[in-house]
Image: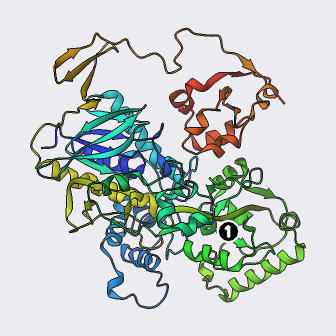
Amino acid sequence: MTDNKRVIVVGGGLAGLSAAHTAIQAGCSVTLVDKEAFLGGNSTKATSGINGAGSNSQEKNGIPDTPQQFYEDTVRSATGIKKGDLPQNAWYELGKVLTYESADAVHWIQDKFGLALDATSRLGGHSYPRTHRSSSGGKFPGMEITYSLIEAYEQLCKQNPQKYELINRARVNKLITCPNSGRVTGVEYKKKGQTHTVKGEAVVIATGGYGAGVLESGSLLEKVRKDLYDKKLPTTNGKHCTGDGIMVAQGIGAGAVGLTDVQVHPTGLVNPRIPKERTLFLAAGALRGEGGILLDNEGNRFCNDLGTRDYVTGNMWKHDKAPYRLVLNSKCAKNIAWHCAHYCGRGVMQKVSHGNELAKVFGVAPSVLKATFDKYNQNFKNDSDPYGKPASFYRGCPWTLDDEFFVAHVTPVVHYTMGGLHIDGKANVLRADDKSPIPGLYAAGECAGGVHGRNRLGGSALLECVVFGRKAGKSLIEYVKTVQGSGAPATTAGGVVTITIPQADGTSITVQITGTGVSTGAPAPAAAPSGGASETKEAQEYTLKEVSAHNTEKDCWVVVNGQVLDCTEFMHDHPGGKMAIMTFAGKDASEEFNMVHDKNVVEKYASDYIVGNLKPSAKL
């Protein structure tokens, strides 16, 4: 039985949430611990979609894909063997689990959380269009998928706080183990300077990778890939991605694999307003999947635009003619219009009305781009691409100067870390010494290594989170059935066990258990409204001109749907990073905000930062 068995999930991205919901669906109680202010992690930033081979959506779209073909594509990406027969030792268990369970992962998201995921794109390294997103747009796929799981978990915590618990702004620094059996029985974490513990029957590590270490001296990434650190590359990772979960598990003897395997994605988006910013948005691989082409600073192609990420990045460095730009014509952009509009709103993509304007962006004569387009059209017609891009992968032909274009400055960026904790096909974390499973410890998502080999295919990050998050959930379900004892939560601080019991009237009773006995606190008053104010104040009104004066990192106001927010402190907690806020410093961000968020997000997560309202007729 799993009823009343408590499990702990460390990390609130898609992998952790997938594990949590799988455990919940089997009757377990769950405590989710995350070191950030908000759940989601890097999962909410995923821009292209989630892979699935043999899915219902592919069948409806007439795509004859199979798990075996996806497996082969994954192995070729993982090993770098692009052509010819694959040797028997190239095939590996985790790759098979990822690909053969991919359709089920997509169906689980569709069936359990009501998402469409009805459109598919072909990304670099894939034989078929298999990267799923919802055709209606409205959000990046990572945000759409992850936020649906976040909302479902938060609702469960609200409905039954004794069974489902969320602890944020809490950094796990130790795994607790049974001294006799060695099984993992809880975690220790720090919050607001105090040390706490949570006990449970099993723990899932889902803390993400270590790509943000490129910005941090002494980081895990600097230790394992100093060459990348010394390049001072930018990253797409949030500041939380420092490898905490990997190092904590290693502290109890867990093994790690492939830590030197770090993916540098070719298309980080450079904002011309802040060209030296090192935390960047990513240009979705689907932009190239829908026909976007990469051009050097002379307006020429230099590689197969749909090659794998390591191939394209390697060619950018070898060719050495930056700045590189990603270009879509109107026919290519039509199928991914929402993404293009969003990037333009963020200031990292530009729309131009004619090829002559595009030539000015490059600083070349229009005849140069015409020659590039003519050659590209001829390659398509004769299936003779000099870089090996099949004509069947071409989109948007014929390309002419008499068209509209979307163009973005792109640069290589540390994006994903393939290395991590050593796991088996059931998401058990394995010991470093004898490769045996550590009882009660599981890992999923980017913190687990060996799933993608040396290079990850686009669309497989979200897939990995769901497949191995569910694997971890299913494995711990079977494991906790064998564990004796109660799964009731116990949180400790400084040697004192504190249990908070919510009451029906909104108050709570606190029970403290120490070595000298038990003490009971009086009912605590109901929580104040999220705004935190004890008195209702009349909202101040501001004009856009007044808001525009607050446009620096030390004094940053933003307008969202008629409300004025002081984001000076909030930007450091924002899941999208500082740049996502600073892009709109002193401006009205409503249009772009509504493209990726539900309208209740401000009241739900940022009501403390509302300083007033925009005057109805306010104009600059």
Which residue corresponds to the image point at 27% horizontal and 37% vertical from the top-left? Answer: 198
Which residue corresponds to the image point at 77% horizontal and 74% vertical from the top-left? Answer: 399
Q: Residue 604's x, y, as percent?
A: 51, 29
At mark 1, the secondary structure is: loop
Q: Amino acid at mark 1?
A: Gly
Q: Is residue 420 above or below residue 314?
A: above
Asked whether, in this view, residue 118 is left or right of residue 330, the answer is left
Which residue corresponds to the image point at 65% horizontal and 54% vertical from the top-left? Answer: 278
Q: Quadrant of residue 427?
A: bottom left
> Which residue is more in the foreground, 128 or 344?
344
> Which residue is more in the foreground, 283 or 494?
494
Q: Is residue 221 above or below residue 375?
A: above
Q: Residue 506's x, y, as percent?
A: 35, 15
> Which residue is more in the foreground, 560 or 213?
213
* Quadrant in the picture for the C terminus: top right
Asked whether, in this view, residue 220 is left or right of residue 288, the answer is left
Q: Residue 445's x, y, as percent?
A: 39, 57
Q: Residue 7's x, y, as percent?
A: 24, 43
Asked whether, in this view, residue 81 is left or right of residue 351, the answer is left
- Residue assigned mark 1: 292
Please indicate, yes or no, whether residue 154 appears anywhere in the rendered image.
Answer: yes
Q: Is residue 278 above or below residue 59?
A: above
